[in-house]
Image (cartoon, helix red, strand yellow):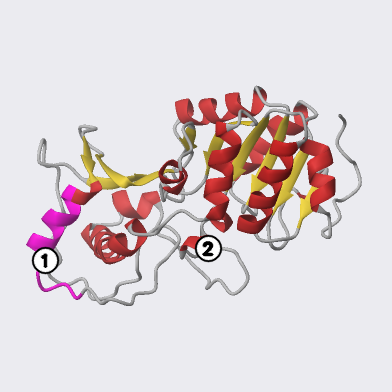
Amino acid sequence: MALATAPADSTGTLDAAVRALAGRKLAVLTGAGVSTDSGIPDYRGEGAPVRNPMTFQQFTSGGPDFQKRYWAGSHLGYRHFATAAPNDGHRALAALEAAGISNGVVTQNVDGLHLRAGSSRVVDLHGTVDRVVCLTCGQFFARGDIAERMAAANPWLDRPDEVRLNPDGDVDVTDIAGFSVPQCTVCGGVLKPDVVFFGEFVPVERFAEARAMVQSAEALVVAGSSLVVNSGIRLLETALRKKLPVVIINRGVTKGDSRAAVKLNAGTSESLTALAKRLAAA
């Protein structure tokens, strides 16, 4: 089925999406919009504050204050981020995989909610916040263990019940004097959450797995992503080169709208739930 060459209609209907996808094996790409109903904000949605996230270069080469600022904010936000629960959109995608309609999920999110919702095959394109890696020796640590160490080393750190959580699981912090940054217990090296920072490349093997999921599918669903990040655009291009029908579900404009077969300008939770029911019955 060839893709429409005209710009997708932002008032596209669920019926049109079902017609484009029914009887096809789906690949799914998700972004921050899928997790907003779980209480995790997104970077670019309506009303989102302007953000300048720390870059990989700042974290690794900007001096100790950058690492202190990142880890203090990340520590404050982690317990809020970690207690977020999967929503209906996550559960709908797990149901599509269980029914054999999709081949899994590629996600740009780092929250781990797809796995917790029951999806079996998940490619965490940008990593996951619940693991920590040593940049020197490569040792991995459970985030919960690191959080306990940080709490013990920084008992003075204020941890209010209400914080302004950012999409990557941290909180903006300015008071970093005296903050003790965790170190690798194996080699004493620099620790970093196992997530892809701005300015850092997605691991080659991980992107290859994501691309293989799209290449083996017969259609692509993009849910909750504005497709601004390069990794998402590259997966969209993979689908377009195979002439796969692309359905985009997102509130607001995305960089793929003009090349989608169908664009649903709607919330992901309700749209994915309805879509999963219709496709299972098709």
Residue at the (30%, 56%) spot, across then down = 62
Q: Secondary structure at mark 1?
A: loop
Q: Is residue 73 above or below residue 13?
A: below
Viewer-proximal residue among 224 and 133: 224
Q: For this view, does 244 lie left or right of residue 138? A: right
Circle 2: residue type: Asp
Residue at the (73%, 27%) spot, across then down = 218
Q: For this view, does 180 lie left or right of residue 255? A: left
Outermost residue to the front: 281
In which image quadrant can residue 136 be found?
A: top left
Viewer-proximal residue among 281 and 250: 281
Residue that carries the numbered disc 2 in the rendered image: 37
Local crowd at mark 2 within 10 Å, few (<14), some, or many (≥20)? some
Viewer-proximal residue among 89 and 247: 89
Q: Which residues are magenta?
A: 145-158
- Residue 155 belongs to magenta span: yes
Residue that carries the numbered disc 1 in the rendered image: 154
Q: Is residue 114 visible?
A: yes
For the N terminus, the quadrant is: top right
Q: CA distance from mark 1 to mark 2?
A: 32 Å
Residue at the (25%, 59%) spot, across then down = 71
Q: Secondary structure at mark 2?
A: helix
